[in-house]
């Protein structure tokens, strides 16, 4: 070993943290929590089983978290489930946005907002 370069196991070495902790104690990004992701993935799994949806992506941004749903991975997302905590007391933190930018539903409760995407069969 070289005595000039510090080792990762020496007390002088500092381990980098990812993501870095800000001084204020708040996270530098917005994310879905475990219960929200459980609810979203249960809907997503049901739609994948029927063959309607095939791919997804999750983006954790500074002011919002976005779960994008794709029919094919090379296309634009069919729907985006957006969590924006700044809108919690106004229109609601959750919204569903279509590919054209139309907001289908907005609200405080994720289960009620996701109900728009759960099509129920009816007799015609």
Image: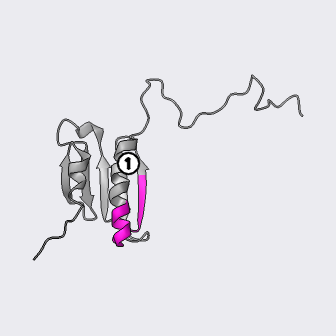
Q: Residue at x 30, y 53 (%)?
A: 81
Q: Residue lying at the far bottom in this picture: please name it.
A: 124
Question: Which quarter of the rendered picture does the N terminus lie within?
Answer: top right
Q: Residue at x 12, y 74 (%)?
A: 123
9 on left or right of 82 = right
65 on left or right of 6 = left
- Residue 75 magenta-highlighted: no
75 on left or right of 96 = right
Residue at numbered disc 1: 37
- Can see residue 32? no
Q: Is residue 81 above or below residue 108?
A: below
Q: Please give the range of residues in magenta.
A: 45-58
* Near-viewer residue (38 or 7): 38
Question: Which quarter of the rendered picture does the C terminus lie within?
Answer: bottom left
Question: On the image, which quarter does residue 4 sit in?
Answer: top right
21 on left or right of 75 = right
Secondary structure of the residue carrying numbered label 1: helix
Q: Is residue 114 above or below residue 85?
A: below
User: Whole-percent x and y of residue 24?
Assistant: 43, 23
**What is the crowding at mark 1: few (fewer than 14 residues within 10 Å), some, or many (at least 20)?**
few
- Can see residue 48? yes
Q: Residue lying at the far front in this picture: please name it.
A: 123
- Residue 49 magenta-highlighted: yes
Question: On the image, which quarter does residue 30 sit in?
Answer: top left
User: Whole-percent x and y of residue 117?
Assistant: 24, 61
User: Whole-percent x and y of residue 62?
Assistant: 39, 41
* Near-viewer residue (39 or 53): 39
Q: Residue at x 79, y 31 (%)?
A: 7
Q: Residue at x 22, y 51 (%)?
A: 113
């Amino acid at each position: 070993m070289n005595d000039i370069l510090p080792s990762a196991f020496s007390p002088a070495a500092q381990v980098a943290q990812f993501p870095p902790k800000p001084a204020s104690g708040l996270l530098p990004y917005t994310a879905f929590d475990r219960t929200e992701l459980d609810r979203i993935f249960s809907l997503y799994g049901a739609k994948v089983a029927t063959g309607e949806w095939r791919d997804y992506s999750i983006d954790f941004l500074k002011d919002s978290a976005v779960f994008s749903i794709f029919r094919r991975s090379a296309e634009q997302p069919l729907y985006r489930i957006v969590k924006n905590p700044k809108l919690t007391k106004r229109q609601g933190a959750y919204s569903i946005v279509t590919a054209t930018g139309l907001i289908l539903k907005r609200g405080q409760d994720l289960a009620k907002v996701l109900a728009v995407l759960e099509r129920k069969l009816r007799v015609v």
